[in-house]
Every structure is written in C-alpha cells, then in structure tokens.
Image (cartoon, rainbow, N blue to C red):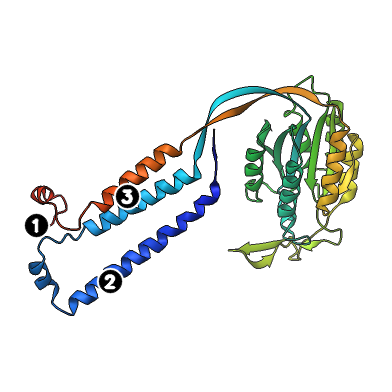
C-alpha cells in the first residue's frame, strides 16, 4: 500500500514539454546559424569531434533527473505496518441498472451517469460500513464483493456501462437474488440493499424476489431515476447521436420511470422508495436511515505506518543532473573507438 504525501507537485511535470520544445528550438537555431557560414559537410570537417547523439542523450538525462526530483517532492510513502482495526457498520450492497434504457437523457447527463453519481455521493458519507456492487440488466453480475475499500468501490462504480452485459432487458429479480449471496455473515443484523433503477422490469418477478430477500433479513431501498414522461434511448457513435432505438414496428421507443414497481419491491422488503433524481434528498435519507440501524462489529486490515521514500528519488535525480552537466557534447575518445554511436 502506498500514498502520495504532496501530489500537487505532480503538476511540475508540465516543465518537461517546455524543456523538450526549448531543446528542439535551440537545435533548429544552431543548424540555421551554421548554414549561414558553411555547408554541413564542411562543418563536420571544421568540428570533427562534435557528437550528433550526445545532445539528445543529455536531454534524456536531464528529463529523467527532473522527473526523479519531482517524484522526490511528491514523496511516495509505502505502508510498512498493517494493523487489524475493529469497526462497526452495516453491510450495504448497491444494485445498479445498466440496461440500455439507462442511457435515456431525461435527466442530465443520462440515467446511468446520474445513478453512478448518486451512489458515489452515498459512499462519500459512509465511514465504517462495508459496501458491495452489483450490475444488472437481463441478468446480474457481481462487480465488487463486500469491502471497506471505498476507493476500490468508486473505481468499479465508474467502470459500469451499458455494454458490459450482452443480454439486454431489465431483470430486477436477478439482482435481488444475487444480492443474497453477498451477505455471508450470519451474525450481521442489518443487511441493506440499495437498488438504483428506472423501474423498467421485464421479468415480472421482482416482487417475488424481494420477498425472498426479505426472508433472508435484507432490507431493500429503491431509488428511481428518470422521468415518468419518459425519453427516447439514443444510439451514439463517438459521442454523437445517430438515431434512437426503435421497436419492431419501426417506432421510437420511449422509456419511462416506473415508480410503482420500485415501490412494490421496497414495501415487500421493509424498505422505502425514494425519488433518485434529487441527490441530496437521497443522501440525507441514507444517512438518517443508517444512523438508526444496529451496527455489527467486524475486523478490517489497515496500514497505520508509512515510510518516506523521497530520499532515493532525490539522490538519483541529483546524480543524473550532475552527470548531464559534466557530459560534454564532443565525442568521447574511448567510446569513439568502440563505435558505440556508429559515428565512424
């Protein structure tokens, strides 16, 4: 495990393109100036010891040296001591709809992106709870098992897209049944499933699956995204809308949020339905709901000691820069004898 002590110094890498452009301009200026006095063949006779490759090699040394100095300023730290800490929290699984209907843009930027931002906002408010992620369309697949690593959760969350499942449709029952396999701790008193969807269910088994989940002690809270007026499903290529999804009769498909199905699922599992279009309302609801739940104590591994690594980067950076300063642009005799740069 590692962490960056001062990541804002990474912006200094912007110096490197300026250095390269400056080098190219100087090389061009030298050649233009030399051409005013003599042809290249004559210049080689006048300065036979001038190396054609060392200037580029010196630039490489300077680039590596500056890069290492910047990394030294950033100060990467490596975890050296792993400690087991005890936490109290609730196990939470997020089931996120990734069917094509989630591409509808009746809520900006579209339903899926809104869902991802909504879940991310909820995760930002968690402290000691464990989270897992499920993606579903016509079937459900596990994306992230129960974990306390919120960084990993956000990474997997951002990777969700409507192309990750080849079979399309929306089967809420598949997501609900899969969620039951995430809660492997029999002593966990509170098991929570946050289901984010537009409510379009093509399986018609959602309520039955919710009853099965409820028997396992899982409380389901549903968040509906999209508008009840609906919107077409865009078909894009390189970010540009080419057309809209059509049915077998050639008519444009209008997908609508179906809160009734989401309400039925939530009521069947002692949960509640919330309008997911209002992020702040959902976040406030989640915080209040989790606050009133019994917490389960569990153990988690955490790095509690980090060791600075900047010394090695600074030392290597200074060595390379000093080497560049003492390296002349003339040919080196012993290297010339070896013909290392093929200059003979």
Residue found 35% across the figure and 66% down from its top: 22
* Residue 271: x %, y % from top left: 89, 37
**Residue 276 in view in this figure:** no
- What x and y, as percent, mark residue 264? 90, 42
Q: In this view, does 182 lie above or below 264?
A: above
Q: What element carries label 1?
A: loop
Disc 2 target residue? 28
Query: With respect to residue 131, does 16 lie above or below?
Result: below
Residue 29 appearing in the image = yes
First in sequence: mark 3 or mark 1? 3
Which mark is drawn over residue 174? none
For the point 35% across and 42% down, the residue is 316
Pick whichever of labels 3 and 2 is earlier in the sequence. 2
**Left or right of 190 on screen, residue 67:** left
Cα separation, mark 2 vs mark 1, equals 24 Å
Q: Which mark is residue 321?
A: 3
Q: 74 or 200, which lies in front?
A: 74
Dot 2 falls on a residue whose secondary structure is: helix
Give yes or no for contact between labels 3 and 1 (Cβ–Cβ under 8 Å): no
Q: In which quarter of the image is residue 284?
A: top right
User: To which residue does mark 1 refer?
Assistant: 344
- The first of marks 2 and 1 along the sequence is 2
Q: Residue at the location (41% across, 47% down)?
A: 69
Label 3 Cα neighbours within 10 Å, binned few <14 / some 14-19 / many ≥20: many
């Amino acid at each position: 495990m590692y962490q960056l002590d001062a990541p804002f110094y990474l912006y200094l890498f912007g110096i490197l393109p300026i250095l390269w452009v400056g080098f190219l301009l100087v090389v061009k200026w030298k050649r233009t100036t030399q051409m005013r006095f003599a042809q290249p063949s004559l210049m080689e006779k006048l300065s036979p010891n001038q190396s054609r490759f060392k200037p580029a090699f010196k630039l490489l040394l300077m680039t590596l040296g500056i890069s290492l100095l910047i990394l030294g300023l950033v100060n990467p730290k490596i975890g050296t001591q792993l400690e087991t800490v005890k936490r109290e929290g609730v196990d939470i699984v997020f089931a996120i709809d990734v069917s094509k209907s989630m591409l509808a843009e009746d809520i900006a930027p579209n339903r899926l992106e809104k869902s991802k931002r909504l879940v991310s906002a909820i995760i930002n408010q968690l402290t000691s709870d464990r989270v897992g992620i499920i993606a579903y369309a016509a079937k459900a697949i596990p994306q992230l098992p129960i974990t306390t690593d919120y960084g990993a959760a956000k990474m997997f969350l951002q990777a969700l897209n409507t192309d990750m499942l080849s079979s399309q449709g929306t089967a809420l029952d598949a997501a609900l049944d899969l969620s039951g396999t995430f809660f492997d701790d029999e002593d966990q008193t509170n098991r929570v499933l946050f289901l984010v969807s537009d409510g379009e269910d093509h399986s018609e088994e959602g309520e039955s699956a919710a009853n099965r989940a409820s028997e396992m002690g899982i409380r389901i809270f549903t968040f509906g995204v999209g508008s009840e007026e609906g919107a077409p499903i865009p078909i894009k290529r390189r970010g540009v809308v080419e057309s809209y999804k059509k049915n077998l009769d050639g008519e444009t498909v209008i997908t609508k949020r179906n809160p009734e199905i989401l309400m039925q699922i939530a009521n069947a599992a002692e949960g509640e339905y919330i309008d997911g279009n209002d992020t702040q309302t959902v976040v406030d609801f989640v915080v209040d709901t989790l606050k009133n739940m019994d917490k389960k104590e569990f153990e988690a591994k955490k790095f509690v000691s980090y060791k600075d690594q900047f010394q090695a980067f600074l030392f290597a950076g200074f060595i390379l820069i000093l080497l560049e300063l003492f390296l002349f642009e003339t040919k080196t005799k012993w290297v010339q004898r070896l013909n290392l740069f093929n200059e003979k």
